Amino acid sequence: MAKIKTLADLKKMKEDMRTKVDIREKADTPENYVQIKVGMATSGIASGAKEVMDFLIEALEKRNIEAVVTQTGDMGYSYAEPTIEVKKPGEEPIVFGYVDTKKADEIIEKYIKLGELVDGIIPVNYQVIDDDK
Amino acid sequence: MDKVKLTIDNKQIEVEKGTTIYQAAKKLDIEIPVLCYMNLEDLGIENKPGGCRICVVEVEGRNNLAPSCSTEVWEGMVVHTHTMRVINARRTVMEFILSDHPKDCLTCAKSGNCELQDMAVKLGIREIPGQEYAEMSEYKVDFSPSIIRDLDKCIMCRRCEMMCNEFQTVGALSAFHRGFEAAVGPAFEMDLEHSPCTYCGQCVAVCPTGALTEKDHTRDVINALSDPTKKVIVQTAPAVRAALGEEFGMEPGTSVTGQMVSALRRLGFDYVFDTDFAADLTIMEEGTELLDRLTKHLNGDKEVKLPILTSCCPAWVQFFEHNFPEMKDVPSSARSPQQMFGAIAKTYFADKISVKREDLVVVSIMPCLAKKYEAQRDEFKLDGNPDVDFSISTRELAHLIKEANLDLNTLPVEDFDKPLGESSGAGVIFGATGGVIEAATRTAYEIHTNKKLEKLDFEELRGLDGIRSATIDFDGTPINIGIAHGLGNARKLLEDIKAGKSQFHAIEIMSCPGGCIGGGGQPIHHGDSSILKARTKAIYAEDAGKPIRKSHENPYIIKLYEEFLGKPMSEKAHHLLHTAYFDKSKKIEIS
Amino acid sequence: MHLLVCGGTGCRAAESDAIVTNLQQELEKNGLQDQVQVVMTGCFGFCEKGPIVKVSPDNTFYTQVKPEDAAEIVAEHVVKGRQVNRLLYKDPEKKETVSDSKHMDFYKKQIRIALRNCGFIDPENLDEYIARDGYMALGRCLTELKPQDVINEIKESGLRGRGGGGFPTGIKWEIAAKNDADQKYVVCNADEGDPGAFMDRSILEGDPHAVLEAMAICGYSTNATKGLIYIRAEYPLAIKRLKIAIDQAREYGLLGKNIFGTDFEFDIELRYGAGAFVCGEETSLIHSMEGLRGEPTIKPPYPAESGYLGKPTNVNNVETYANIPVIINKGANWFNKIGTEKSKGTKVFALAGKINNVGLIEVPMGTTLREVIFEIGGGIKDGKKFKAVQTGGPSGGCLTEEHLDTPIDFDNLVQAGSMMGSGGMIVMDEDDCMVSMAKFYLDFTVEESCGKCSPCRIGNKRLYELLDRITQGKGEMEDLQRLRNMSQVIKDTSLCGLGQTSPNPVLSTLDNFYDEYVAHVTDKKCPAGQCKDLMTYTIIEENCVGCTACARVCPVGAISGEKKQVHNIDPEICIKCGACIERCKFDAIIVK
């Protein structure tokens, strides 16, 4: 381990180490970040939800988007799996169906970055399953 | 020095910054009662743990009461020393202290001389609420050859601890346990006998209660005196005569040599002798040894041990045996005057009066408690019979005299018996710090230079500073002399010797503050150093009044060598008057 | 995904180590060891429901987790994304489960400054501390601020000593800074000794670097180069984590010479205490560190003038230090907006006693006792009635119903007859006898007095004896006056804070529950039914069928009676063990 010799060293190290606790800090105030929930019930995993989730985590980090990716249970749209719910700060959550890695990439680039709508939104009367309120 | 103005009991006073409330009040003649506090002024001995809380006073603007002994004054301070809040607090605290103190005053060694008893009277304590169900702390009584510790009577004033650790650096006593069980004693609750205690008795000298007292030998003395088959002789140490009068209401510093002699004679001692005689003998032996080593040194002998250290003080001997055993060949091998006296009495004198050794009882009156221990050391016994049978303190002698309905104030002045009662002024000054080395200088100078000493008073060797030094011109040879009283001061000089830094040729060491006049067997000084100063004055006055003031001029000493010993350091002298020291450093055991 | 497992002493005692091991094994089985990180953190505070496992990023808060639950957590939550409902916290009033700690009453009103990293980072990992702005405050102080600027910032923040005294920290630092000496010291008092208190322990176990960083900042401000942490040897986990932290900080160059490339040097050593309560008093603490008997000496001189080895020494408590880096990072003006007029920031309390949510909390100064006890603490256990709360440990006093809406701060608590102390808060219900409570604390004080001054050494013992007699029904009315007088004199005359405050439990119960004392003395009854000696066991004739079960179970043969006849208990022989009541099937035995 190199010694910290200046304040700049420390600042750099803090940046490097940030990811270590990032996930915990964001968990405390998720409303400030893009929150993505991936439906990860058995059927979801079978249809590739795990790969989608891994992709999202990696892609968001690479593209410097502050986001919290969590998993959730069956979202009630098993016909459209894998499904993900995306909630941007201050906006209502939107659920997307049939999400593969390509779709996920599109969601990041268009919806999350630019606010443009993307095909595959499951529009009506859904309920967020693990909302604690 | 910055000055501070304050008001105590509506009286204004200006004192130096750093003064305590107690000291400031004293200047206004307001005597705040103190219990744990003790200050031997000019000796650098002060005990103010602020523990007893008897001396509390009210200070305006302060939430709680302030301990006056240890609270420094500040500008504009307003103090009240006897409000009802203060009086109630003092009384309640005193009730607390007494609730954990035995009520056996009738048979307590300190009855009538107890600061706690006096305080109870002063604060008007008539009953202790809740005493019937109050638990009392209990400890086993520790009997050592010199000192008895009865911790049931300890009030945690910590004076003994301060003397033992700070002044003497002996470290035998320190507080142990916590809270209600707390008391002061050797580590691991060892007995004193197994501790590094030197029996200097300074703990006893400062104890305000009966927790620390001397081992009483008056009963043994009475038994010996009542035994018709025994000849009982007595020797009295120099410092005793300068303090005994205090026990009979005399002014401190009143010398009572003659009255003491007649009291002893009336008590039934067959011969009343003087340890001063043996002190002169000590000078002959120790002085010769000094000159011997000095001559060798001046002739270039690198092996010779210098400085030579005096060896009259038994607590000091214990101290270096415990703490500096590697230096046990540095002190003079001369026995202490008490033991020289005993050895001569049970040989030379016993022969003279044709009494068998076992029928001769030697009693010594000492200002010292370590002498009790010294008297029973194995090397000072012949077939189990000690050279000195019983050593009693000045205080014990006072008890014996009072018990016999004698009053020192009205007794005639009488002389010591011959031959062991004659002494020079040099023998007398053994009782004060610096006295032994002054006495040795008087003799060594004349023997070394073959010249008569014109001025006998070596003022440069006297005084109360803990460590003193002087260079005496031995006719062209400068002799460096060091003096220490208090074992803490002695330790400093010893560390120098050990480190090879000492420039001294000879060092006198006494354990007690002021020397033997401040010994652990003397009348209790209750923290008043003016008493010690007065005793010192009396010692030097006695010396000044003596017709003979040099040991080697004592005719009975000369006669002793002619008739019996031959010359100083002769084989016989060596056998009877010298000793060896032992390594006691590993004798610390946990009982 | 991160699984945070509480590694505080309490949760470890409930095998949280095994939870970590099992979680790791389960993750490996599922091939998830690279994606999911298991972190052992410091204390979450909610000790009542420990061991705690928290899942990030979804913030699921599992309570009372057992090692064998690991498999289910991994299989359900980690793999399938389904929360394990049975491990979620259930709100006792609303009877609903709450998965996110943010929505739990226990956490809602808390603001965590001193505890900011407890339950959040791995205390044995300096990188995680750095990721949380660790050592940033020290870096800024050393490179951007003058020592006096730092002191001014602390002064302006209004931070007061959290050990109990409430002395302004900035002023303390300033005094130490102004006393010139060739060597000065910074001491951290981690000799936490109040019964039931574990604030400092939790901070040291959960966020040791915060204390090290603050001590270094203090060293910079006061021109001291040596830091000493006086910690009781009974805190092995805190000691272990401190040692790790010190080693790591040295390795990173954050302790030692030329810190942040400046001339400043600072290092820290540990000193172990034997757990004497009095050593929390700063002069005693210093004597103990010097190898002397742990006893107080009179102040002045204060440690800031003449402390460790006679050198100027700044002594602060663990929690005080834990606030320092945050104050530097966020600014005095951020900090002093929290709290009340004269007490700024937050205070950590250890909730204990008859309260539903036993644990460690941190609330802004000014929070009321009611909020702490009834909202955060979840109210009184078993639906019993609140009777009193003891704040300030054995030095404090009890506060009652009428004080519940008092905003907690240093001055208000003193005014109400208690004190802040170091943060112990023990809640009592209707079954607690207040005389026994006072006796309990006196027992503690008697045990912990150093014995140096007579009022504390003997006076407290006498207070205890008198209280003991009262609980035995041997008290008399005049004893109550004596209790009060002795208490006042002990307060008035004792040497150090221990004795000056030890009678507070007696005085405050005399003030608030005088009737209860009188009941013990005149009626020889204990209204709370707690004092054994004042209870009598009697048999209700109508209910007794003479089955002899009670007589057979009585260990001392105090019950007599023929078969099928009404039995009788001899009160002289009865030892009030309660065995008969337990055995009786007919509710025929009562205690009065």
Image (tube, rainbow, N blue to C red):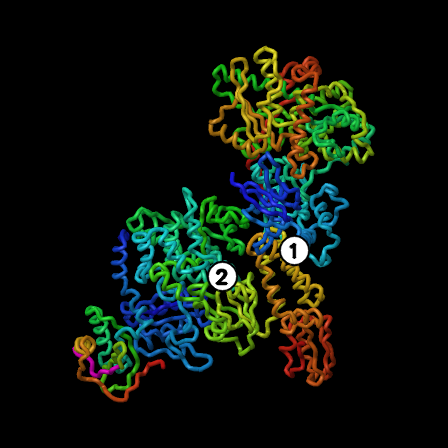
Of residues A71 and C333, the one drawn nearer to the viewer in this rendering: C333
Q: Is residue B545 above or below residue B322?
A: above
Mark sitting on residue A61: none
Q: Is residue C140 above or below residue B288?
A: below
Give the foreground label among 2 and 1: 1
Query: Pointer 1: what residue?
Result: B85
Q: Is residue B215 magenta?
A: no
Image quadrant containing the C terminus of chain B: top right
Looking at the picture, how far across and down is residue B248, in whole percent?
Answer: 76, 34
* Within-10-Å neighbours for mark 1: few <14, some 14–19, many 20+: some
Q: Which residues are magenta?
A: A93-103
Q: Is residue B436 above or below residue C240?
A: above
Image point 62% across, 37% down: which residue? B40
* Amino acid of disc 2: Ser
Looking at the picture, how far across and down is residue B392, in whole percent?
Answer: 72, 33
Looking at the picture, how far across and down is residue B459, in whole percent?
Answer: 59, 22
Looking at the picture, how far across and down is residue C217, in whole percent?
Answer: 37, 53
Chain to which the residue tagged by mark 1 belongs = B
Query: Pointer 2: what residue?
Result: C422
Chain to which the residue tagged by mark 2 belongs = C
Image point 29% across, 77% down: which residue? A71
Q: Is residue A96 magenta?
A: yes
Instruction: Give the Cα distance between marks 2 and 1.
Output: 31 Å
Per the image, label 1 sits on a secondary structure element best described as helix
Of residues C197 and B87, the one drawn nearer to the viewer in this rendering: B87
* Amino acid of disc 1: Arg
Q: Are marks 2 and 1 on the same chain?
A: no
Of residues C189 and C140, the one drawn nearer to the viewer in this rendering: C140
- Is residue C106 visible in this depiction of the protein? yes
> Circles 2 and 1: CB distance less than 8 Å?
no
Per the image, label 2 sits on a secondary structure element best described as loop
